[in-house]
Amino acid sequence: MANHTLEGSRCEAIPRQSVSQRALIGAVEGTLADFLASQIAALDAVDPALGGFARTARDLVMAGGKRLRPTFAYWGWRGVVGPTEPVESVLPAFGALELMHTFALVHDDLMDESDTRRGRPTAHRIFASQHGEHFGGSAAILVGDLCLVWADQLLSRTRLPAATLLEVRDRYDRMRVEAIAGQYLDVLGESDPASWSVERALTVARHKTASYTIQWPLSFGAALAGGDRRLDEAFRVYGTTIGEAFQLRDDMLGVYGDPAVTGKPAADDLRTGKPTTLLMLARRMSTDAQLAAFADGDIARRAQIIAETGAPRRIEEMIRVRVDEGLAALSEAPIHPDARAALIDLATAATQRPA
């Protein structure tokens, strides 16, 4: 069990109180690093090729990112237990969420045929450079699967009563099912965009992103603390609304984001034809002439036409409304003040981000 944060090669003790975002991320990454080192050693002993495979998986897990899921889980937990409870016993559970996230990213990148993630080659591109495209796709699927198994293993190391872990596991499983359901709808939408709608795009956002980025991590964290049913509705509303706003911001970044900041190719959603809420709104708000120009235009022209329809302004308003609703749900929730303040800050950070 890790009891340190990582800053390069330097280790520090975890404060036995509410920790800063930087210290929390360091503590989670320290837990992951210790766990992954033992897993790599076990596979290395079987065959050196397996050790290399596991190291690639580790590098994908440790390649940075916002670590939003463990962060929201931490504040869901802290909102129940208060500011002084030691965090060490639940660090494996927080790390498990990051392993699950890597599973989702690796498979999502393969489905989207993305070349980069966090400014680095995606898993299937890494493996394709070794033995070709077919091998790259196959190995990426296996890396994702391995991360999901590792998530289960790490979660099982959480030092809590069995009854508490059963409730935690129930929420964890529901989170996974909703994420996979949302991903399927996302793939379906790309395959049949003509039948898609704004409402269906929001359903995808609610399941693929909101539930497994914010809503269920918060609920998962509260369950780690033994739960407080009075928080369930507040966390559900906050998680759904802020999660949807998070995805709406992602839709905007997928068209107008700076690749140097986002770490992903420019206008990836326009290239793949992903029927996001932004694109569906633009289609609904377009004139016949704009629709015709969009069909014939290149990527830059399509982005310009979307802006001309007014859809980006509508998306910004949708984000604002959802953030307001989410924060209102927190205002009367029986959580500790430091957790409420942190969740307010996170709502802004998650929905007004440049990447």
Image (cartoon, grey):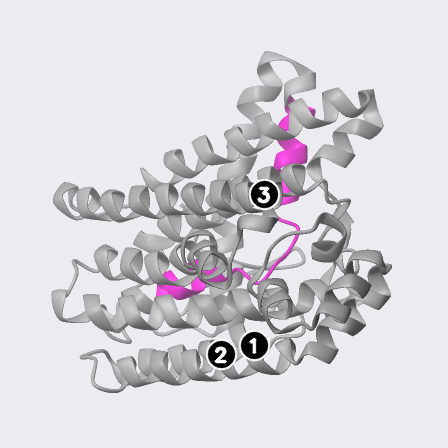
Question: Residue 341's quadrant in the figure?
Answer: bottom left
The Cα–Cα distance between marks 3 and 1, rounded to whole angstroms, is 23 Å
Residue type marked 3: Asp
Residue at left 61%, top 65%? 251
> Magenta region, mostly helix, strand or loop?
helix
Residue 62 vs residue 178, the one in the foreground: 178
Please give the residue where the numbered disc 1 appears in the rendered image.
315
Residue at left 77%, top 49%? 120
Is residue 222 in sight in this rendering? yes
Please give the residue where the numbered disc 3 appears in the rendered image.
192
Residue type marked 1: Ile
Q: In this view, does 150 lie to the left or right of 259?
A: left
Mark 2 and mark 1 in contact (Cβ < 8 Å)? yes
Q: In this view, does 267 lie to the left or right of 111?
A: right
Residue type marked 2: Met
Magenta stretch bounds: 51-74
Up the image or down, 55 lies above or below 176; here it is above
- The 10 Å Cα crowd at callout 2, few under 14, some 14 to 19, many 20 or more, is some
Residue 285 place in picture, x, y as percent: 61, 74
Question: From this viewpoint, which residue is outermost toward the front?
Answer: 288
| Mark 1 element type | helix
Give the mark nearer the N terminus: 3 vs 2: 3
Mark toward the viewer: 3 or 1: 3
Please give the residue where the numbered disc 2 appears in the rendered image.
318
Residue at left 79%, top 28%? 128
Up the image or down, 22 lies above or below 136; here it is below
Question: Residue 299's quadrant in the figure?
Answer: bottom right
Looking at the figure, which quarter contains the N terminus? top left
